[in-house]
Amino acid sequence: MEKARPLWANSLQFVFACISYAVGLGNVWRFPYLCQMYGGGSFLVPYIIMLIVEGMPLLYLELAVGQRMRQGSIGAWRTISPYLSGVGVASVVVSFFLSMYYNVINAWAFWYLFHSFQDPLPWSVCPLNGNHTGYDEECEKASSTQYFWYRKTLNISPSLQENGGVQWEPALCLLLAWLVVYLCILRGTESTGKIEQLANPKAWINAATQIFFSLGLGFGSLIAFASYNEPSNNCQKHAIIVSLINSFTSIFASIVTFSIYGFKATFNYENCLKKVSLLLTNTFDLEDGFLTASNLEQVKGYLASAYPSKYSEMFPQIKNCSLESELDTAVQGTGLAFIVYTEAIKNMEVSQLWSVLYFFMLLMLGIGSMLGNTAAILTPLTDSKIISSHLPKEAISGLVCLVNCAIGMVFTMEAGNYWFDIFNDYAATLSLLLIVLVETIAVCYVYGLRRFESDLKAMTGRAVSWYWKVMWAGVSPLLIVSLFVFYLSDYILMGTLKYQAWDASQGQLVTKDYPAYALAVIGLLVASSTMCIPLAALGTFVQRRLKRGDADPVA
Amino acid sequence: MAKADLSAAWIFFFLTLPCVFHPERMLWLLFFLVSAIHAELCQPGAENAFKVRLSIRTALGDKAYAWDTNEEYLFKAMVAFSMRKVPNREATEISHVLLCNVTQRVSFWFVVTDPSKNHTLPAVEVQSAIRMNKNRINNAFFLNDQTLEFLKIPSTLAPPMDPSVPIWIIIFGVIFCIVIVAIALLILSGIWQRRRKNKEPSEVDDAEDKCENMITIENGIPSDPLDMKGGHINDAFMTEDERLTPL
């Protein structure tokens, strides 16, 4: 007799799990960056169009597949067609890569959170140098927040080749992050739901990409979540709700991020003016307090004419302070979260409170997404009879967490951040596009769109609107193909891939080329997930051939 | 030193010139001599001279005081006080400290001379003396290291407070222990639940065995083979009898 599949206590739990998975760090640090790069408010137009045309249909598709097949990604795709079990395997592989490096972000968030309970905040002051006569050189050249991130948190090496050893502080934080994730997934799904420039073609491509990755399509997490649903659950409504909430969160996060940008830009601009005033006052022995923001230009002109030689001597040191150039600095990713935001926070009143709240929020977002990722890996494993008969659920979860934690220690080494960037940029991007494309084609053309539609109608009691059918069968696959082609050609045209390395002597980032073995790792990352699909199909084909070969002599 | 020699030569020249002996002129000459030597000793960029820069308005805003000769006197007093703390220089007087080139910045140069007022004290001594007493000097003027600068004398910066056990490790330890305890509790409760589930089916089996000893079902009619009625009454027969309508 088949063991009853665990169910969500109610549909609200399921919705919250999906939202907590979809709303992640990308909403906070990728979307505001894209808005800024592609014209601010006008980026919302391609974003919303892509949401309606690509995001919602694909989300609904994945949820429907999971709810109909009532299995994790591997089982679900095997049911649709045995040749397509590779899609599920590819999803699990990609989820595995993602969970390896994603939890490192939570480790960093924990590190900053623990350091927020000090006065003054450790990233607001530079440490002193050896003989206490001035500040540390690297910190002077960069800024105190950059120094804290690159030197104290990462202890980053100057290039990818210099590996260094495992740093014990981030390693401890990573261990804690994995323990927290294990605590949440220990009991299985029941516990995870608890309380989660218009003409510019690049703008459209980035909008499509952002929607795609922001919703977390293709990892198998949504299939896993939906497989625990009652068959009669109205997943169409939930798909729309989840995607809308995800987008609203992105927009809300952008509003907050832009106000932080404005605060930081104003503060830095005023600081710059003060520095220039001080330099002029000291060089020309002007009266203290004479130079203000309003008369600065006037006085500069007067000094240039009155003392030309002295002025030209010190002219290279004068920076042109401009509010626009401060506002133009657009940052995304870990740089935004851990450098720009901390810089803004350190200048606020009661900075410890804001810091604790901010990193707590980052942790909630990160751990919510991690639970979705681990669900994508665990659900197929616990579904498989072979594994679940030998090991209890707790042991499987523990094993997965242990393996991921051990491999994740690579990211705590001195060159760890460079490997992190490799995984972040290449582990999921191309593979996911391919996986979701194969998923859509599989459901529409291999399983049959009519068959799927009648299944859904029998399951939920509601007919599938023509809009969804058109999107699934035509528009979304076309969009994904064009995205795929664009990115592939982009990678090929760019030539050797480059990365940003931190130069301690200059106090800034420099561009370097990836060494050969790093390029090999990138190729392996992409290949290991995408090759699963054809390899599994081939394997099934060979298996069937052999079976037919055995059956023939008997008949 | 060379400048002092040069001015001494000039003075000698003056004295040897034929002139009427006049007491006032002698006094003027003496004054000129003294100020000339002083001027030579304290010059921007002179040997053993230091430039000082004050940013009073930046530090105090509206409560800023004006920099006048009285403040200069206080400054000379503080420098003399610092020098007196150096061994072998306990005889330093306020008059040994010379100020010059006061600008509206406010910035000026100063030197410290020895009791003979002919030589300036070596820069190293003045430097170490000022460094030792920088805090007192700052407080006398309500300023700090950023607003009262002695160029070429770097101030010892106060290191940030460094507790013996970093705070973050304490918080980390607390959260770590909580998480480990929670995990252990969940795992243990899972094991207990499973053990209870394993016990229940075996208890139900025992009860069923007992029941089977009591009742066997013959032709769909329960009868008790161990009934002690001695076989006089056949339960199966009896039931059939009742199905017939009574006459």
Image (cartoon, helix red, strand yellow):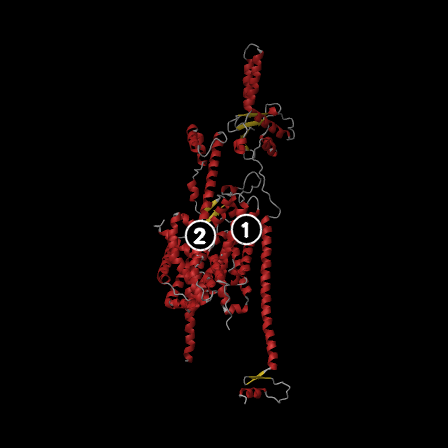
Lower sequence index among marks 1 and 2: 1
Query: Disc 1 to disc 2, how far (Cα)?
Result: 25 Å
Q: Secondary structure at mark 1?
A: helix
**Which residue does the image show at 43% across and 54% down from the upper left?**
A247
Lateral position of residue A166 relative to residue A48, left or right: right
| Chain where mark 2 sits | A
For badge 2, the amino acid type reads Ser
- The spot of residue A167 in percent (x, y) is 55, 52
Q: Position of residue B221 (x, y in %)?
A: 56, 84
Query: Of residues B110 and B179, which is closer to you in this image?
Result: B179
Q: Chain of mark 1?
A: A
Mark 1 or 2: the one toward you: 2
Quadrant position of residue B117: top right
In terms of secondary structure, where does tag 2 sit?
helix
User: As drawn, which residue projects farthest toward the front?
Assistant: B247
Residue A110 appearing in the image = yes
Q: Which kind of residue does numbered mark 1 sit on? A: Trp
Residue A392's place in the image compared with B90, above or below, is below
Residue placed most toward the observer, A498 or A468: A468
